[in-house]
Image (cartoon, rainbow, N blue to C red):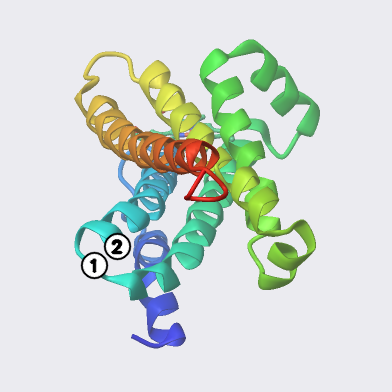
Amino acid sequence: MDQGRRISFLTCPVLGMVWRIIKSDLGANPVEFLQHATGDWTLWFLVFTLGITPFRNLFKLPDLIRFRRMLGLFAFFYVCLHFITCLGPDQSFDVAAMWKDVAKRPFITVGFAAFVLLIPLATTSTAGWIRRLGGKRWQLLHRSIYLAAVCGFIHYYWLVKSDVRKPLFYGALAAILLIWRLGTWFSKRGSAVSMKLSSQRAPANPSE
Ligand code: HEM
C-alpha cells in the first residue's frame, strides 16, 4: 500500500465523523458522541502502534515497521481532535477553565498526562530527530508511549461509571503488549549479560 492510500485508509474514522456531522446524525448528545468517538480511536491507534513490533516479530513481517510511525501520528491526531472536542464545547475554549478541570477531575488529569506524553513523541517522529537525538536516546524517549497507553487506560477506566468491560478489554490488550515488550527486553538483556560474562571468563590465551 502506498503512502497516500495508507493515509486515506487511516482517515476513514474522521471522515465517518464528518459525514455524520453533515447528516446531523450524532444522536441526542453530539458533543458526547464526538468525545467518545475520538477517545475510542485514540486508544485503538495507540494499541495498533504498540502491536506493530510483536506482530512483526511473531509473523516475520519486517515491512510492517513502515506503518508504526504513521499509526503513532494518527493516535496523536485523534487525541488532538479529542482534546478539541473537550476543550471547545465543554469549556468554550477557555484555557483557565480547562486547567481547573485538569486539576479537579482525576480522570481528566491522567488523560491530559497521556496527551502531554504524546506531544514529544509526535514532534520527534522524523528521521532528522532520530539523527539529532541518537538511536538509543530516541528509543528511550519513545518508550513513553507505553506510559501514555497506561494513562489512557486509567483515564477511560475512571470515567466509566458502570460497565467497565470496554476499558478492561483495552487494558488487557495494552497489558499483553507491555508484558511482551518487557519479556523481550529482559531476554535480550539477559543474553547480553551472559555473553559479557562468558567473554570475561574466557582466557585471553587459550593455552593458559
Ligand atoms: C491519550 C490520551 C487520551 C485517551 C486515550 C482518551 C480516551 C478516552 C476514551 C476512550 C473516552 C471514552 C470513550 C467512550 O466512552 O467510548 C474518553 C472520554 C473523555 N475524555 Fe479522553 N482520552 C485522552 C485524553 C483526554 C484529554 C487530554 C482530555 C481533556 C483535557 C480528555 C477528556 C475526556 C472527556 C471529557 C471524556 C468524556 C467523559 C464523559 O463521557 O463523561 N481526554 N477519553
Q: In this view, does 167 lie above or below 200?
A: above
Answer with left or right where residue 187 lies relative to residue 88.
Answer: left
Q: At 34% across and 20% down in the image, what residue appears? A: 160
Please name the residue shown 53% across and 47% down the image: 79
Placement of the N terminus among the 4 image quadrants: bottom left
Q: What's the mark number on residue 120?
A: none
Q: Where is residue 32 in the image (x, y as percent from the top left)?
A: 42, 37
Q: Which residue lies furthest to the front in this view?
A: 207
Q: Nearer the viewer, residue 62 or 171?
A: 62
Looking at the rendered structure, the kind of residue marked 2 is Arg
Residue closer to the observer: 110 or 69: 69
Please give the label number shown on residue 56.
2
Q: Is residue 137 visible?
A: yes
Q: How many labels does the image show?
A: 2
Look at label 1 and name its amino acid: Lys
Label 2 Cα crowd, 10 Å radius (few <14 / some 14-19 / many 20+): some
Q: Gap in Å between the C-alphas at discs 1 and 2?
A: 5 Å
Judging by the rendered image, the residue that carries numbered circle 1 is 60
**Is 88 placed left or right of 201 in the picture?**
right
- Are the residues tagged 1 and 2 within 8 Å (C-beta)? yes
Mark 1 is surrounded, within 10 Å at the Cα level, by few (under 14), some (14 to 19) or many (20 or more) other residues, namely few
Q: Residue 6 placed where, x, y %?
A: 39, 78
Q: Residue 43, image x and y in percent?
A: 39, 43
Name the residue rendered at 57%, 34% in the picture. 114
The residue tagged with tag 1: helix, strand or loop?
loop
Tell me if I can see residue 11 in this picture: no
Nearest the eye: 157 or 51: 51
- The residue that appears at 27% across and 70% down in the rendered structure is 61
